[in-house]
Amino acid sequence: MVVMALCLVSPAVASSHTDPVIATRITELENRLHEIETIDRTALSKEERKALRHEVKEIKKELQGISGGVYLSIGAIILIALLLILLL
């Protein structure tokens, strides 16, 4: 799950923002994700693992909010394609 979170984070996002405060925040969040990835989760309790999962989800949400953009699911893309085919 942590690996998926790291895949969603694009290094280009940090460089695309001109605001140094936003770029700094993105770097902090990426560093925290790398720290979480290196943690030995077998030594953690169930509550600690749950807290880490929650933290990763919150970081992903914040990074997606910063990057902006529109996210479409596969179902939405198929529906749009079908509507375009029927209408054209």
Image: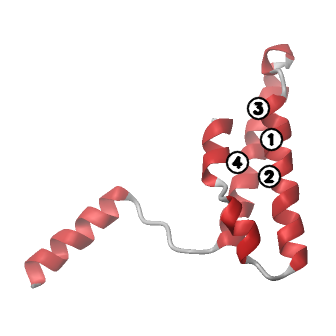
Which of marks 1 and 4 precedes in the sequence? Answer: 1
- Horizontal and vertical percent position of residue 23: 83, 70
Q: Amino acid at mark 3?
A: Lys
Residue carrying label 3: 50
Could you tell whether 15 is left or right of 28 in the image? left
**Left or right of residue 15, residue 20 in this image:** right
Task: Residue 24: give x, y in percent of width and height.
Answer: 89, 67
- Please state the horizontal and vertical placement of residue 5, each as a whole percent of the image: 65, 45
Instruction: Categorize mark 4 by other alpha carbons within 10 Å: few (<14), some (14-19), many (20+).
Output: some
Question: Which comes before the other along the chain, label 3 or label 1?
Answer: 1
Residue bearing the label numbered 4 = 57
Residue 45's place in the image compared with 38, above or below, is above
Question: Going 67% across and 46% down the picture, which residue do you hit?
Answer: 6
Which numbered tag is attached to residue 34?
A: 1
Q: Which numbered disc, 3 or 1, marks the residue closer to the eye?
A: 1
Name the amino acid type tagged 2.
Glu
Alpha carbon separation for disc pair 3 and 1: 17 Å
Q: Secondary structure at mark 2?
A: helix
As measured in the structure, the alpha-carbon distance from the residue carrying label 4 to the one carrying label 2 is: 13 Å
Amino acid type, label 1:
His
Position of residue 18 relative to residue 36, above or below, is below
Q: Residues within 10 Å of mark 3 (few under 14, many from 20)?
A: few
Marks 4 and 3, how far apart at CA = 11 Å
Q: Quadrant of the N terminus?
A: top right
